[in-house]
Image (spheres, helix red, strand yellow):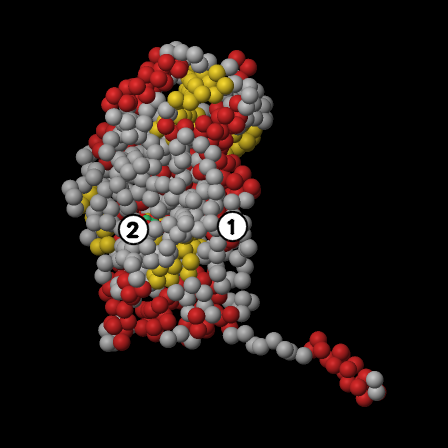
Amino acid sequence: MNSAKIIFLSLIAVLFPFMNFAQELPVYQDISKPVEERVEDALSRMTLREKVGLVHADRSYGAAGVPRLGIPENNLTDGPSGMRPEMVWQTWIHAGLASDSCTAYPALICLAATWNQEMGMLFGKSYSEEAAYRKKNMILGPGVNIFRTPMNGRNFEYMGEDPYLTSQMAVSYIKGVQSNNVAACVKHFAVNNQEHLRTTINAVVDERTLNEIYFPAFKAAVQEGNVWAVMGAYNKFDGQYCCHNSFLLQDVLKGQWGFDGVVVSDFGGTHDTEEAIENGLDLEMGTDLGSIEAYNRYKMADPYIDLLEKGEADEAVLDDKVRRILRMMFRTSMSGHQPWGALASEKHMADSRKIAEEGIVLMKNEGDVLPIDLSGVRRILVVGDNATRLMSRSGGSSEVKSKYEIVPLEGIRNRAGDRAEVIWQPGYSVNASESAADSLRKEALDAACTADFIIYIGGLNKELYQDCEGVDRQSFSLPYGQDELISGLAATGKKMAAVMVSGNSYAMPWIDEIPALVQAWYGGSEAGNAIASVLFGDVTPSGKLPFTFHGKLEDCAAHSIGEYPGDGETVEYKEGIFVGYRWTDKENIKPQFAFGHGLSYTDFSYGKIRLSAKTMTEDEAITVSIPVTNTGKRAGAEVVQLYVNDVKSSLPRPVKELKGFKKVYLAPGETAEVIFTVGKDALSFYDPSVHGWVAEAGDFKVMIGSASDDIRAEAGFRLADRR
Ligand code: BGC
């Protein structure tokens, strides 16, 4: 090599690191730039038609991106408990892919029953890793509509009757999901509390009730969970469809609460182009599928372009919608931070099982029938259709294509191994004629004679008119003649436990006849193993009821007052704020099982309650503490619940309201000091005369208990007058 060449090459080597070969990235593609800058830059490059392309669906679960600019499509997935199978793009027919089998997580009512925000985080994190793996940038969940009546076919997808519990659990789920740069979409805003006539019914709910019962979980999702999307409800509120309801979306959600994310319509829930444009809808999703032309006919597609081109719609309003969608994308698929994810991994299945185990509620356990001691048991008879029924793949939009699902019988067999013979009798059938039902029952009763232990596995299922989207239940009783069957099995005098798989409450005419009852919900992929681990004592149950189990339907306010399901056009929530335990407390009705109820295999004692002060001002908070001890022989967890009572108030208030809870894990003999902070928010009610929250000076009571009907300690304090 000659010296000129050597000098040239050495120069290149020295200068190389300083040479800029990278093309300058446009701002919107530069992940180091602030989201708002990226949004404005992308928006400034888009044509009007490209913008409209972003605000409506172009397939069953997606909306266009901007191919010219490299902005990806939006890729949504149902539902709250795991991914819905992929659909053929323009239909609701399963695509039958080999690649979309995933983890089914428990139904959200089971998550709520854990009363544990850590489980909410785990759920959201684990599930969003599955979504990320399949390149989804939005999960259509959680559902947070309040349990107003046990007839609602979708209660299993929601988180119970209490606004505080629902808010806490929803926020933890949302934080978990969004920690992986996948958007959560909290639904259905608002007052979608029945499936009956859900697409037309007009809910009439007063301002106080909205703010105290039906809004808090949505507000917490926005303000504490920083949720990136909200789905409107199908029904009307005050005569206007919720998906383009100016009060709900403009005044409350985007106005008062400052929501900066995307309002997504429920599918097919958009009815009017101008209302949708003006009243705050950002992304129209739908069910009027069939062809690309069908999507172009959507209310916010070609009809929107027409109005814009005629100058009858303001482009600035469109820009606001597009900004919100872009913001969500820069937080998710274009953040540069979405993880690779994983699908149906062992870890995710274990997460799902853990949540299912923590949510199972031990309702009754006389004579310590549970946990089952295998030493004295040779033959176990399992009875019931739900012992073998797959649950996660049905029920409506929350269906999940689980890679596998362990049904209860399999879980029990896995656990019993060869230590006991496990036989199964259906006992009842979903389709049986009367005579077939009689013989199924008889066969189960005959088999009971030779069993050492009977495990009954029944409840509801995901069939129409049970726990199923689109329709409500038709009866509060258990279906398929289960009541007679359970009584018959109980009459054999054998050791017995009933395990109910459902997302709703039901009548229990046999409750005094059976020694043990377990409420197991829908537990997802690992449901059967989770049930078995509780039945055999590998797990000490620690779930608590997220809603009241009424003795009879008339004990529920919506039914007692006669305001369910409405008159065909309107349903008026005449019971106001008195939903669930707020009603049974007020009317002195003894529930079958109270809100917050749940037993353990160990015992907990509560010590002396202590308050940091006897008086507080509005700007202060008091600390409430109580020692809780595991006095039994097993490790276990207790959910310590804090309720507040306003002794005297200018408006009627509930006898008690949940304002705090903590789940504590304790070894035998261990004590934990459980500490709560009670501030002004916990003392306030919504006063419609001032359109705001008010804490009235005076006496308050704080109650700490193991359930809403099992208060172990209480103490009084005063909120001082404002000076
Ligand atoms: C449900 C939504 C769901 C959507 C998409 C609607 O019928 O109400 O909760 O996300 O369908 O499947």
Give the Cα separation between the discs numbered 2 and 1: 27 Å
Q: Is mark 1 within 8 Å of ligand 1?
A: no
Number of residues whose C-alpha sits closer than 10 Å to that of mark 1, classed few (under 14), some (14–19) or many (20 or more): many
Mark 1 lies on residue:
129
Instruction: Name which residue lies at 48% across and 59% down.
Output: 332
> Which residue is at the front of the view, 566 or 429?
429
Instruction: Name which residue lies at 35% across and 68% down.
Output: 53
Q: Is residue 336 above or below residue 721?
A: below
Q: Earlier in the sequence, mark 2 or mark 1?
A: 1
Instruction: Name which residue lies at 71% across and 75% down.
Output: 17
Q: Is mark 2 within 8 Å of ligand 1?
A: no
> Which residue is at the front of the view, 494 or 582?
494
Contact? badges 2 and 1 (CB < 8 Å): no
Residue 416 seen in render: yes
Find residue 450 and report its horizontal and vertical position in percent: 43, 12
Please give left or right for residue 156 compared with residue 183 in the image. left
Mark 2 lies on residue:
233
Snapshot quadrant of residue 11: bottom right
> Which residue is at the front of the view, 93 or 581?
93
Kind of residue sitting beneath label 1: Glu
What mark, if any, has residue 543 been given in the picture? Answer: none
Q: Residue furthest bottom?
A: 4
Task: Please tell me whether mark 2 sits on a helix, a strand or a loop.
Answer: loop
Find residue 659 and report its horizontal and vertical position in percent: 41, 38
Q: Quadrant of the N terminus?
A: bottom right
Q: Is residue 348 above or below residue 290?
A: above
> Which residue is at the front of the view, 491 or 2?
2
Kind of residue sitting beneath label 2: Ala
